[in-house]
Image (cartoon, helix red, strand yellow):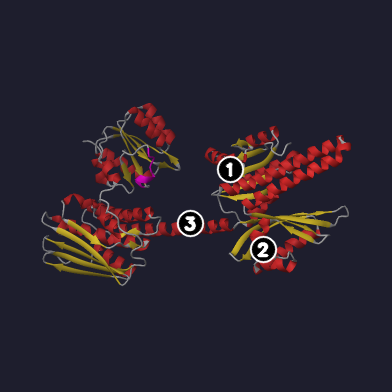
Amino acid sequence: MNADEKVNILLVDDQPAKLLSYEVMLRDLDETLLKASTAREALEQLLRADVAVVLMDVNMPELDGFELAAMIREHPRFQHTAIIFVSAVRLAEPDFLRGYEMGAVDYVPVPVVPQVLRAKVRVFAELHRKTRQLEQLNRHLEMRVAERTRALEDTAARLQQSEERRSLALEAGQMGSWDWDVLGGECRWDKGQYRIGGVDPASFAIESASVEGLVHADDRARLRGSLAALLAAPGAAQAEFRVLTPRGQRWCFGTAASIADEAGRVARVSGVTIDITERKVAEERQALLAREVDHRAKNALALVQSIVRLSKAETVQSYVDAVNGRIKALARAHTLLAESRWQGADLRRLIREELAPYRDLGAGRIGVRGEAVMLEPRDAQSVGLALHELATNAAKYGALSVDAGHLDIEWRLEDGRVVLTWRETGGPPPVEAGRGLGLRVIVGGIEQQLAGQARFDWRPGGLVCTLSFPVAAPAVRPNGPAADAGSASEGAARQVLRRGRVLLVEDEALIATMMRDLLAEMGCSIIGPHASVAEAAAAIAGQRPDAAILDVNLGGEFIFPVAESLRALGVPFAFVTGYGRDMLDTHFPDVPVFEKPIDRDQFIQAFAP
């Protein structure tokens, strides 16, 4: 095998998309990439080809990565084949140990960093190539004794080149290697090992005390025990530990092996150290994000539960309208927070979103003025609910209930607090409200949740309400031109759909039931509801609908193939989604979009009578 001859790298994953991504990442290695989507295919590929490295997913439906690795190791041919696991979940130390017992040489966490993956695969491909080179050279040496000297010199040169390439690959992958001649008392580090330790090769002495001084005090005893075991008998060991460098604390993963001489004494210990700080930080962030998502989801559910329990009305319909309005107020605040990745919500946009249902009342009837203010996520939901209650009251009993009424909203910053004034004029004489849920929502959200103040002045010309609350970072980005209260999705939803036979595709049973009832109210006949792309495609093949309502994401499966089929048939359709319009496929810019939670009136108005 020549130094530049390609080696075979086997990619094993049950998901074609992930196989494709690995192929793209490793294409630059210029090696032969073999693919398998099942354990059976993987074993067949191994039997047909000489595989240098196996890159496999830990979690697969038939056999998991551990079981497949065990089967591979049982075959004599594959006892030394390098196996790298890819895991999308955080693995505990027992999982690592189990993987190494099954024959794994390394782990790659998800999300996969292409440079790291290429570096790791390149290392083991080079090791495989070097091993095959040595085997070939040994055969030649037996056949050509007379040329032994020259062959050995050539081999040494090739090995030196391979070692240089290996060192470069290790350095690129934030890895370092070291070798300790136990009997000779000499220890050597490569450049990567010095870099990981944050020390200067010219001044750092590789001695027991100085090396131990780099290791975090809490990890030293464990590493001493692992080293003692390697010196007692030939074997291998792995460990995670921390090193203290001028850049700060770094997390490392180390693996080492010891070999014995002819007398049975441990003569050499060699190892590889990998800087896994970025992976550790990513794992911590992922865990924090999971906890934060759980916290926010439970808070949102608790808010919805409170709204449902506390809302009161004289009729069922008015109760539904009240609950629906408050939930949509939460949804609007949530949308703004999602757009900023939960960094905050722009107060001006929040106000305009809450007043969007009243944007058609006429020019000049609603005025909005104020400085640039970004609200914290928790503050945005409380302020959004308060604004919704004020707007609902104004539309039912105040300035927005009559043609001559006006509403002015103005806010300013004073000593780290937002002072917002809601001023109604030209409306009917206000009646001072009792302690109903709307008032309780405003007072509770502003005064209890935000430690602010809510003052109400029922003047003859209309209500004047002043809300004052603190903000942590009141102006983190400027307000650009204010967006119109109507969203792009609302504009698209005014496109006309045909009533008649309507294909309904939605995998959430309660949402599907609600939309089915709305369609039935309009006199439509419903095809479905269907909960998968396959079911929807089969329904289209069976009968051509007059229109279609399509949920974008069906349990991780996107509806776009069905949308393309409907477009080819000339059938109008609309999307239903919890994503924003910007998350939709760019091939459907003019398709109506109903964002969850669904607005009943908007849904009905999208269909021609």
Residue that carries the numbered disc 2 in the rendered image: 200
Query: Counting other residues with Cα less than 10 Å from the Cα at mark 1, is it few (<14), some (14-19), or many (20 or more)?
Result: some
**Relative to the observer, which residue lies in front, 410 or 508?**
410
Q: Quadrant of residue 555?
A: top left
- Under circle 3, the secondary element is helix
Residue 488 position, x and y percent, is: 29, 45
At x 73%, y 44%, the residue is 80
Apparent side of residue 428 relative to residue 180 in the rendered image (left or right):
left
Residue that carries the numbered disc 1 in the rendered image: 60
Residue type at mark 2 is: Asp
189 relative to 514, above or below: below
Which mark sits nearer the N-terminus, 2 or 3? 2
Instruction: Please report the bounds of the magenta region as a residue range.
Output: 580-586
Q: Quadrant of residue 312?
A: bottom left
Which mark sits nearer the N-terminus, 1 or 2? 1
At x 37%, y 67%, the residue is 472
Q: Residue furthest bottom?
A: 415
Residue 510: image tag: none
Locate the N terminus and report the quarter of the image it occupies: top right
365 relative to 504, above or below: below
Q: CA distance from mark 2 to mark 3?
A: 40 Å
At x 66%, y 33%, the residue is 44
Q: CA distance from mark 3 to mark 1?
A: 23 Å
